[in-house]
Image (tube, rainbow, N blue to C red):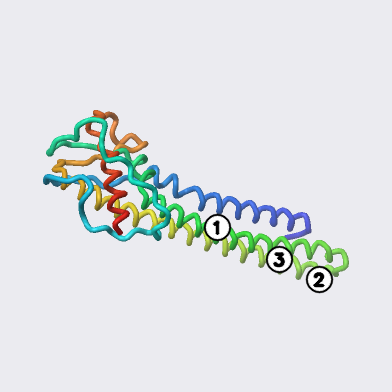
């Protein structure tokens, strides 16, 4: 670090990194939810539509919940023994458990943003203070002050990296908990309806084509939300 201009540049860089981190934290869960696969089931047995397995614990606390999506498909339900599929993006976007998990994560992201802003503000204040007093300092004093600022910048960068890692771990845990719950419920639904297998139609193109009559996304989503509300 050689001069105030360099210090100012580093301050701007730190601010930019903070903003990028927050945008990453705040937006990523939606992308993960849209792309994450749900486990398929290969078991069979008869029966109901909105009854079932014990409710697993969700990642986020229950908040305001939206009504379940109507369970009735466009046509008759596929017969027992059929191989059916669900659209993962539609299923997870409509699942109340995922909505609550996203809401919980967004709340945490605001806390991480505040931490980032505090780091940025502290470093920027230190740089501005140095710039005001630099002209009256001896070369030795300027060198010492710049060394302190450099250390402060490095500490701030390390703290930001820690926050980013914390956010990534929290996001992964939150998403995995929801997906594990969804997988269990989809498995229970498949068994209850005697389906041989439930496949996943994902945006990545896991299923290139499937007859619409075999799409059970709507009734499965209604079942998931019904089970979620029981917890």
Q: Nearer the viewer, residue 124 or 189?
A: 189
Which image quadrant: the N terminus? bottom right
Q: Which residue is mark 3?
A: 149
Could you tell whether 75 is left or right of 89 in the image? Answer: left
The picture quadrant where one finds residue 176 is: bottom left
Q: Can you tell which mark lies on residue 110?
A: 1
Q: Which residue is mark 2?
A: 140
Q: Nearer the viewer, mark 2 or mark 3?
A: 3
x, y (%) of residue 113?
58, 58
x, y (%) of residue 155?
61, 66
Q: Give the Cα separation between the discs numbered 1 and 3.
A: 27 Å
- The residue located at (39%, 57%) in the rendering is 174
Which image quadrant: the C terminus? bottom left
> Is there any visible trace of residue 200 in the rendered image?
no
First-in-chain label (1 vs 2):
1
- The residue located at (23%, 58%) in the rendering is 54
First-in-chain label (1 vs 3):
1
Could you tell whether 65 is left or right of 116 in the image? Answer: left
């Amino acid at each position: 670090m050689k001069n105030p201009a360099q210090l100012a540049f580093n301050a701007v860089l730190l601010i930019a990194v903070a903003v990028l981190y927050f945008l990453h934290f705040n937006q990523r869960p939606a992308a993960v939810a849209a792309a994450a696969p749900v486990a398929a089931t290969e078991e069979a047995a008869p029966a109901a539509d909105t009854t079932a397995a014990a409710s697993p614990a969700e990642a986020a606390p229950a908040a305001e919940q939206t009504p379940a999506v109507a369970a009735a498909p466009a046509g008759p339900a596929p017969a027992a023994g059929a191989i059916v599929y669900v659209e993962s993006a539609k299923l997870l976007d409509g699942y109340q458990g995922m909505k609550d998990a996203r809401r919980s994560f967004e709340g945490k992201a605001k806390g991480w943003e505040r931490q980032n802003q505090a780091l940025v503000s502290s470093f920027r204040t230190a740089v501005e203070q140095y710039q005001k007093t630099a002209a009256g300092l001896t070369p030795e004093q300027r060198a010492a002050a710049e060394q302190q600022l450099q250390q402060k910048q490095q500490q701030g960068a390390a703290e930001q990296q820690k926050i980013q890692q914390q956010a990534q771990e929290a996001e992964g845990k939150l998403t995995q908990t929801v997906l594990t719950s969804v997988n269990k419920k989809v498995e229970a639904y498949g068994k209850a309806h005697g389906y041989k297998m439930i496949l996943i139609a994902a945006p990545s193109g896991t299923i290139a084509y499937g007859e619409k009559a075999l799409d059970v996304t709507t009734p499965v989503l209604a079942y998931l939300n019904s089970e979620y509300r029981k917890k």
